[in-house]
Image (tube, helix red, strand yellow):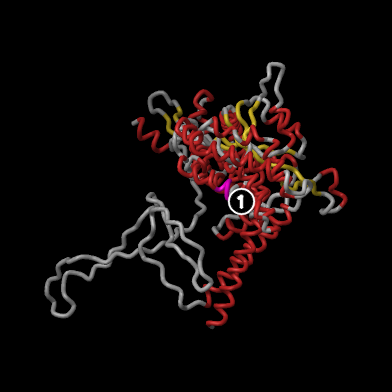
């Protein structure tokens, strides 16, 4: 048994090291292959850890007090022992007290018992979801004097003439677009609860629910895209190509793109709430980006995609639609790839120099923009200028066609964009906000092979816009969508902004405040 556990631990460590290396190599021509390998390795790692837990009788029990505060960061686990932390629950999690009272009389002598204290332990359990039929009975009454018939009007439904309730629709939307559970699997889940809901019916419900939400999503998109600073990034998704559907599945799939545009002013204590807008495009042509950002302007933080070039191009007065802010994390990855492949001392020094800039950034995250600028001018600017001079010297000493030279030229050719963060405290040092926004797409690709059509990609983008923005604002997307779907048809258009994630107050709270 001990030798088996030891072998499992060593294999777990090997898989973790391999996954960590692949995650740092995810950029470049082979990024999709690497991503798929990471997904498969993570699944294998998960299965191996379950098998280890099944056979490990020596694992320590968890503390019986549930953790409510974020855990402290832990170092890497040794091969002999896997790092564990206690389950963590929010302060709003419902609690039930079950009191085990020995009674009033002593079981030994019959004397009267008095309370001297209690031992409290905690058990984390789950109440299974239920399908519930709500009967809406509208009682008819007639006036004994004038024979007038009186009856309450039928309440509005999220989908007119449909029996789908708001909470059920919210569960389906979040399951499909956030948890990435296919509808045929939801059919199986609902069947276990006693309701046979065909996946074809759920398809119709999803489409009509999204149609009801579209006015709110459009308002959200307009608000976020008007931000003076936007993060942008994109990722590929596979899409069924209807024009090639007769040529077989392999040939009938094309590569579409999902773009994410993010407003996140939290790092500099800005006043606008965070939000993310997702847009689908059937290909990688620049015309889509120009359309997405046609009504926007200010500062755009993004990678070196050529499609952004026209947005930065100066007009006759020397002003561009956007000022470009480059991403130091992207530059750092280029040097890291060289270091991993060649152990170059120059690449290692580049990583160390960039690391110092990130050390400074960690100190000023969450502070006002003017303070961030002052600190950067004092501490970061001299180091950035030194990096520039050092990089130019290195280019004269290394082969001009190598990956290391390419990394230096990438940074030096866009130096104005790489230094914009020094002069504007609102600008981030990197584009990680947009990269984080695209992670749900990577998670989704584990569960679905492709979008069913261009229209399916567009629906996915709109659904992610409202769900991910709700999450960015600290909301439970299922509770939020259930409440919004219950109220949206009764909300007058001038008041629709009250249902935006950053303005939303649950219906029950609104009614209590009005009473």
Quadrant into which the C terminus falls? top left
Task: Say if residue 159 shows up in the picture.
Answer: no
Residue at the spot x=62%, y=53% of the render?
A: 348
Task: Please state if 103 lies on the left or on the right of 261 as rendered.
Answer: left
Quadrant into which the N terminus falls? bottom right
In front here: 266 or 178? 266
Q: Secondary structure at mark 1?
A: helix
Q: Residue 61 placed where, x, y %? A: 41, 71
Task: Please state if 344 lies on the left or on the right of 285 as rendered.
Answer: left
Region in magenta: 349-355
In front here: 395 or 286? 395
- Examine the image and state in which quarter residue 275 appears: top right
Tell me: residue 70, above or below residue 142: below
Q: Residue 330 placed where, x, y %? A: 64, 45
Residue matched to label 1: 349
- Examine the image and state in which quarter residue 207 appears: top right
């Amino acid at each position: 048994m001990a030798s088996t556990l030891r072998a499992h631990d060593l294999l777990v460590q090997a898989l973790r090291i391999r996954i960590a290396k692949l995650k740092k190599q995810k950029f470049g021509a082979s990024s999709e292959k690497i991503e798929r390998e990471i997904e498969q390795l993570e699944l294998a790692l998960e299965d191996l850890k379950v098998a280890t837990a099944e056979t490990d009788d020596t694992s320590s029990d968890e503390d019986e007090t549930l953790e409510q505060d974020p855990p402290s960061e832990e170092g890497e686990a040794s091969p002999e022992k896997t790092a564990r932390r206690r389950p963590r629950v929010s302060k709003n999690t419902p609690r039930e007290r079950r009191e085990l009272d020995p009674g009033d009389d002593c079981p030994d002598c019959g004397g009267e018992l008095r309370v001297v204290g209690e031992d409290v332990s905690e058990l984390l359990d789950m109440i299974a979801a239920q399908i519930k039929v709500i009967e809406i009975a509208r009682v008819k009454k007639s006036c004994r004097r004038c024979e007038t018939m009186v009856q309450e009007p039928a309440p509005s439904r999220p989908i007119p003439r449909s029996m789908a309730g708001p909470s059920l629709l919210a569960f389906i939307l979040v399951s499909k677009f956030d948890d990435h559970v296919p509808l045929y699997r939801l059919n199986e889940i609902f069947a276990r609860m006693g309701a046979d809901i065909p996946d074809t019916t759920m398809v119709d419900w999803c489409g009509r629910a999204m149609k009801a939400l579209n006015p709110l999503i459009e308002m959200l998109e307009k608000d976020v895209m008007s931000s003076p600073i936007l993060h942008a990034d994109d990722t590929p998704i596979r899409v069924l190509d209807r024009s090639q559907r007769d040529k077989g599945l392999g040939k009938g799939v094309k590569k579409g793109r999902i773009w994410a545009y993010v407003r996140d002013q939290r790092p500099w204590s800005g006043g606008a709430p965070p939000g993310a807008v997702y847009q689908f495009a059937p290909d990688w042509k620049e015309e889509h980006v120009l359309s997405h950002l046609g009504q926007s302007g200010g500062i755009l933080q993004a990678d070196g995609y050529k499609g952004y070039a026209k947005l930065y191009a100066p007009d006759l007065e020397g002003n561009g639609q956007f000022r470009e802010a480059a991403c130091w994390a992207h530059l750092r990855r280029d040097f890291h790839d060289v270091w991993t492949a060649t152990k170059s001392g120059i690449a290692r020094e580049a990583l160390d120099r960039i690391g110092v800039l990130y050390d400074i950034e960690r100190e000023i995250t969450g502070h006002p923009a003017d303070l961030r600028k002052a600190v950067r001018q004092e501490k970061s600017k001299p180091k950035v200028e030194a990096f520039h001079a050092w990089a130019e010297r290195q280019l004269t000493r290394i082969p001009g066609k190598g990956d290391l030279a390419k990394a230096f030229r990438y940074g030096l050719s866009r130096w104005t964009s790489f230094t914009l963060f020094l002069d504007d405290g609102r600008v981030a040092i990197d584009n990680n906000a947009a990269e984080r926004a695209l992670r749900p797409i990577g998670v989704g690709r584990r569960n679905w092979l492709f979008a069913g059509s261009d229209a399916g990609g567009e629906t996915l983008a709109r659904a992610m816009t409202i769900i991910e923005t709700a999450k960015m604002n600290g909301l439970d997307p299922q509770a939020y969508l259930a409440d919004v779907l219950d109220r949206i048809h009764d909300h007058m258009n001038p008041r629709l902004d009250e249902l935006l994630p950053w303005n939303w107050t649950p219906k029950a709270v609104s009614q209590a405040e009005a009473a």
